[in-house]
Amino acid sequence: MNCNMKRRTIMIFPQFDNISVIDEIREKYDPLANHVRPHITLVFTFESNLTSIELKEHLEKVLTRTRPFGLTMGDIIKIDNPLGMYLFLVLKEGIEDIKKLSSKLYTGILEPYKPEWLNDKTFLPHMTIGNSTSRDDLDKAFKNVSVIKESFTTIVNKVSVEIIDENEDSIIDVEVNLSND
């Protein structure tokens, strides 16, 4: 990897009053729980030598006139596909807002990084709360968490760019507030 290349992800870190419920689930079932806070991905992990300044300018440009919006999450689903075996906390409200944000971000300098599989039909905005390598473990985890009927609500007012270091730790690189005007 050339020394200017950085692995980044663009995401939202929702601020829920009851986030401790999510933290407890992730500590049990998500190997990345100690590396990155609970988040919703807008631009999936990509490697580039884009600078923080270029990214910040891109975000500010495409997020102009994007107002803060409400978000509610609640249902936990099990995903078992060629990309992996996961527990997702999915959105009840704010799905279209997240999809719009994501497609705005995947324009201009970020367009080349849009995964081929990602489109309006395949993009399921979510928060990963579990990741498994065995179907058996995934089923057990799902059984344990499916009793949780909690709702998580917040206002999204900021988009963050993280750098993923060699230890898989998340380092916030750029943050852009959504505009209130």
Image (cartoon, rainbow, N blue to C red):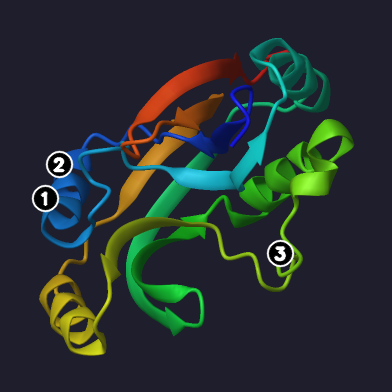
Q: Quadrant of residue 1?
A: top right
Front residue of 103/114: it is: 114
Q: Which amino acid is tagged 2? A: Ser
Viewer-side label of 2, 1:
1
Please state which amino acid type lies under the numbered disc 3.
Leu
Residue 154, image quadrant:
top left
Residue under label 2, please give it.
20
Residue 163, horizontal then vertical, whole percent: 49, 28
Residues at discs 1 and 3 in contact (Cβ within 8 Å):
no
> Could you classify mark 2 by the number of other residues whose Cα lies within 10 Å: few (under 14), some (14-19), or many (20 or more)?
few
**Looking at the image, which residue is at 18% across and 62% down?**
29
Quadrant in which the C terminus appears: top right
Q: Of 92 and 100, which appears nearest the observer? A: 100
Q: Is residue 6 left or right of residue 115?
A: left
- Residue toward you, 37 or 34: 34
Measure how far apart labels 1 and 3 are at the Cα level.
30 Å
Image side of residue 147 versus residue 51, left or right: left
Mark 3 or 2, closer to the camera: 3
Kindly identify the residue that appears in the image at 65 percent across and 15 percent down: 52
What amino acid does circle 1 point to? Answer: Glu
Which residue is denoted by mark 3 in the rendering? 118
Taking depth in this image into account, of 180 and 61 the one nearest to the observer is 61
Residue 36 locus on image (x, y percent): 32, 37
Marks 1 and 3: which is nearer the front?
3
Residue 107, position as x, y percentages in the image: 85, 40
**Secondary element at tag 1:** helix
Indicate which disc, 3 or 2, sits on the residue closer to the N terminus.
2
Q: Is residue 163 above or below residue 32?
A: above
**Measuring 52% from the left and 39% from the top, which residue is drawn there?**
70
Element carrying mark 3: loop
State the residue position of label 1.
Answer: 24
Q: Are marks 2 and 1 in contact (CB under 8 Å)?
A: yes
